[in-house]
């Protein structure tokens, strides 16, 4: 437990220093970064001062804003091309969606490891109520907490990354995100729950069937029903 707490403090300080370095290099001020993330300037300064750490979605958003790669926060200074304004307009919504996805994946991994939130809380030193808020996407997961959680769930921190800079084209990213955000909120929630993956895969396979085959499947289902 003590080792995990010490590791969390060291990495929190490191991320804060890298975040400040990236902001200064991009000639941005703390108020601008705070407004981007829809948090107070005081909350943002806690990130840079190594008191708290941002969540992965928040770090993804700030890396877009500062025109740097996520690798910068893992010790690399590589750059990536600036994303278009249309993507940035949806950053707040994207952060909320990503928080829900990350929370759902934490819950899925915890269940697969046959752990209760109370047991995971004991192992990680993170309050049970906080863990439950993380899983429901109601609270952003600081990277330092996510790294500790993922280590106990036999996952890597990298598996939670969005890797937007590795996608084929900026235009395709914007189109896909816009299409997703245009869906009804209930449908967005359904899509982001890992438990619903089989239904989505089935729908995808059905959509690819020729009309005659699809009609045959529908007739078969009717026969079973009636």
Image (cartoon, grey):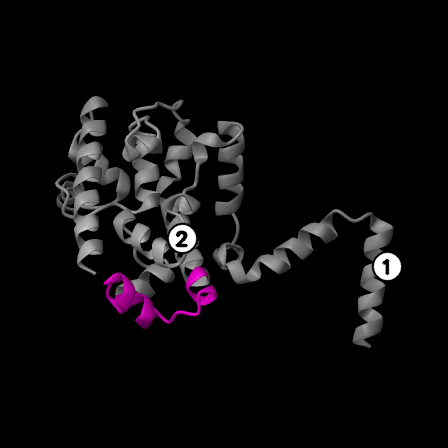
Residue 39 in percent (x, y) is at 22, 46
> N-terminal of the two: label 1 or label 2?
2
Q: Quadrant of the C terminus?
A: bottom right
Answer yes or no: is residue 202 visible. yes
Find disc 1 in the rendering and name its residue.
216
Numbered label attached to residue 40: none
Alpha carbons under labels 1 and 2: distance apart: 39 Å
Residue 34 in percent (x, y) is at 21, 40
Left or right: 63 as drawn, with respect to 11: right
Answer yes or no: is residue 140 visible. no
- Vertical position of residue 48 compared to residue 202: above or below: above
Sort mark 1 into few (<14), some (14-19) or many (20+) by Cα contacts within 10 Å.
Answer: few
Find disc 2 in the rendering and name its residue.
102
Look at the image and say whether residue 201 sits in the magenta stretch: no
Q: Magenta part of the protein: which range?
A: 109-129
Look at the image and say whether residue 125 sits in the magenta stretch: yes
């Amino acid at each position: 437990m003590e080792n995990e707490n010490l590791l969390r403090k060291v990495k929190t300080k490191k991320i804060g220093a890298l975040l400040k370095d990236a902001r200064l290099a991009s000639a941005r001020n703390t108020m601008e970064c705070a407004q981007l993330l829809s948090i107070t300037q005081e909350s943002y300064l806690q990130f840079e001062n190594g008191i708290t750490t941002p969540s992965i979605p928040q770090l993804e958003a700030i890396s877009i804003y500062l025109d740097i790669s996520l690798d910068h926060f893992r010790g690399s200074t590589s750059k990536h091309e600036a994303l278009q304004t249309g993507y940035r307009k949806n950053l707040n919504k994207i952060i909320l969606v990503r928080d829900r996805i990350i929370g759902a994946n934490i819950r899925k991994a915890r269940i697969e490891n046959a752990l209760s939130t109370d047991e995971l809380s004991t192992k990680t030193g993170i309050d049970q109520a906080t863990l439950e808020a993380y899983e429901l996407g109601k609270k952003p997961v600081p990277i330092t907490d996510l790294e500790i959680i993922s280590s106990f769930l036999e996952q890597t921190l990298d598996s939670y990354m969005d890797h937007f800079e590795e996608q084929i084209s900026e235009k395709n990213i914007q189109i896909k995100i816009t299409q997703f955000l245009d869906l009804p909120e209930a449908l967005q929630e359904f899509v982001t729950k890992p438990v619903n993956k089989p239904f989505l895969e089935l729908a995808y396979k059905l959509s690819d069937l020729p009309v005659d085959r699809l009609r045959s499947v529908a007739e078969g289902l009717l026969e079973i029903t009636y």
